Amino acid sequence: DSGVTQTPKHLITATGQRVTLRCSPRSGDLSVYWYQQSLDQGLQFLIHYYNGEERAKGNILERFSAQQFPDLHSELNLSSLELGDSALYFCASSTPGLTEAFFGQGTRLTVV
Amino acid sequence: AQSVAQPEDQVNVAEGNPLTVKCTYSVSGNPYLFWYVQYPNRGLQFLLKYITGDNLVKGSYGFEAEFNKSQTSFHLKKPSALVSDSALYFCAVRVTGGGNKLTFGTGTQLKVEL
């Protein structure tokens, strides 16, 4: 168990809908990262937050947004969902001074 | 831009034999290199990392990796494979001073057979 908690584990929704994925980082970790894993794109970095502030953006669509709250948990919001958004979404966290990130078990999103 | 290549989609090895999973990288700057493993329906588990120092780094579950700067490689190795090592392995790179973004390879499926 990495200590990173993601909810829900599975999500099935229809095209055009909006969903929110939640991540609780390891205790003491200030950084939260979101990644998308799909068969055609592999593991892609989406966005990084550090202590509530956005630090870096990757291949994140405009329909997607994220935030990190004062208690350091983070949410990834996906809107106007398309079939191609079906993927495994991972959250990871890291602590200052440590270079590696620890991943949650992911949320599997299926858009039908 | 940074990139990672894992040239083999799948590696098959017999239990008890040594295994190698290959990884090469391309960065402008000093790399931080990582190996992660993913079991079915699970998240990525951190195995080991190279930051600086000894080119041979040891990690979890008996795995080790060798950093080779001239060949820009970071191959994952284990002297004696177990069936339970069968999983998807990812190599990743982060550039010092380039933020904390990890760039992953496409993954290598390791299959260890009896």
Image: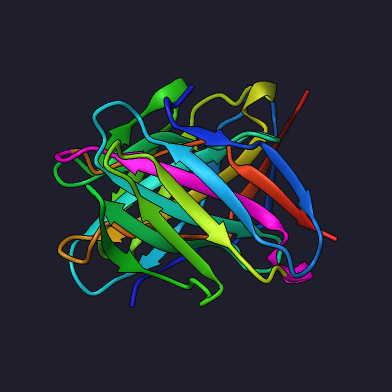
Identify which residue, A80 or B58, lies in the foreground. A80
x 24%, y 44%: residue: A99
Vertically, is B46 above or below A99? above
x 79%, y 67%: residue: A15
Q: For the C terminus of chain A, which image quadrant?
A: bottom right
Q: Position of residue B63 (x, y in %)?
A: 44, 30
Q: Position of residue B88 (x, y in %)?
A: 63, 43
Residue B25 is covered by the magenta coloring: no
Q: Using the rendered image of the protein, determine whether residue A40 is visible from the camera's viewpoint.
A: yes
x 38%, y 55%: residue: A67
Q: Using the rendered image of the protein, determine whether residue A101 is visible from the camera's viewpoint.
A: no
Residue B49 relative to residue A34: left or right: left
For the record, the magenta segment spans A82-97
Identify the image's colour scheme: rainbow, by chain, secondary structure or one colour.
Answer: rainbow
Residue B42 picture quarter: top right
x 39%, y 62%: residue: A47
Q: Position of residue B73 (x, y in %)?
A: 37, 58
Identify which residue, B99 or B107, lies in the foreground. B99
Q: Position of residue A26 (x, y in %)?
A: 35, 29
Residue B64 relative to residue B10: left or right: left
Taking the view exactly as shown, the residue that stands out farthest to the right is A112
Count the marks. Answer: 0
Residue A100 picture quarter: top left
Identify which residue, B24 or A4, lies in the foreground. A4
Residue A95 is covered by the magenta coloring: yes
